[in-house]
């Protein structure tokens, strides 16, 4: 096991830099810190979803995702480190397919809502997209394994499907975009 934090503040970041997992220091507003910081934010948003009552299959899936997001943050915090693999992406796709199997096909756009859990899941989905964008931006400037981007892309799709599942489970149902509202 790695280092344990016995003291939370070190003052080493007072100069506007932070330490990476390889011991190097980088500005706190660097692309790398932005990418793994957004992944941390995503993990927190999933924690908010987990704070409410959920179907057990959704709970188990999201807890597994939280652990993988921590791994992914570590991968981005330690340049050259690998923690997310093709098998992780395949597992996301399998979960996505399983949750999506019982949903009706989409015929309209869905607005965020459908109960507290679904709404929070939609918010997590948008943070996943932002994390993906930040990771793509980082990959233009520094070495990032393709699996990191692929994982975030699939995860945002999974969170969308889970939001649909949660909206239906809440009894409130999905909130459909009414594209004809201005014409009535």
Image (cartoon, rainbow, N blue to C red):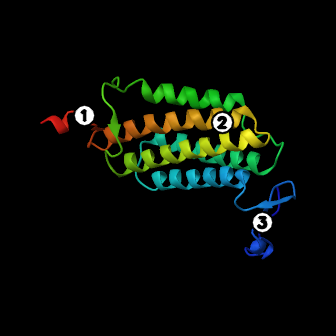
Secondary structure beneath dot 1 equals loop
**The label number, if any, that marks residue 17 in the structure image:** 3
* 121, above or below 90, in the image: below
Label 3 Cα neighbours within 10 Å, binned few <14 / some 14-19 / many ≥20: some
- Residue 137 point in image, percent of width and height: 67, 43
The quadrant of the rendering that contains the C terminus is: top left
Q: Nearer the viewer, mark 2 or mark 3?
A: 3
Residue tagged 2: 149
Q: Residue at x 64, y 32 (%)?
A: 150
- Taking the image as drawn, is residue 6 in sight? no
Query: In the drawing, does residue 71 fall left or right of residue 127?
Result: right
Q: Residue at x 36, y 27 (%)?
A: 103
Secondary structure beneath dot 3 equals strand
Q: Earlier in the sequence, mark 1 or mark 2?
A: 2
**The label number, if any, that marks residue 179 in the structure image:** 1
Q: Residue at x 66, y 36 (%)?
A: 149
Q: Quote the CA–CA distance across marks 1 and 2.
A: 32 Å
Q: Residue at x 66, y 32 (%)?
A: 88
* 121, above or below 99, in the image: below
């Amino acid at each position: 096991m790695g280092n344990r934090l016995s003291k939370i503040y070190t003052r080493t970041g007072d100069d506007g830099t932070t330490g990476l997992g390889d011991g190097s220091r980088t500005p706190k507003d660097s692309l790398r810190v932005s990418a793994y910081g957004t992944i941390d934010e995503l993990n927190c948003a999933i924690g908010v979803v987990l704070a409410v009552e959920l179907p057990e299959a959704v709970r188990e899936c999201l807890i597994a995702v939280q652990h993988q997001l921590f791994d992914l943050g570590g991968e981005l915090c330690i340049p050259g480190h690998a923690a997310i693999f093709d098998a992780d992406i395949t597992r996301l796709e399998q979960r996505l397919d399983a949750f999506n199997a019982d949903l009706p096909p989409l015929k309209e756009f869905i607005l965020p809502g459908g109960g507290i859990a679904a709404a929070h899941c939609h918010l997590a989905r948008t943070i996943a997209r932002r994390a993906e964008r930040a990771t793509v931006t980082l990959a233009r400037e520094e070495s990032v394994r393709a699996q990191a981007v692929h994982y975030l892309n699939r995860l945002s799709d999974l969170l969308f499907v889970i939001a649909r599942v949660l909206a239906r489970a809440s009894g409130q149902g999905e909130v459909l975009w009414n594209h004809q509202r201005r014409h009535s």
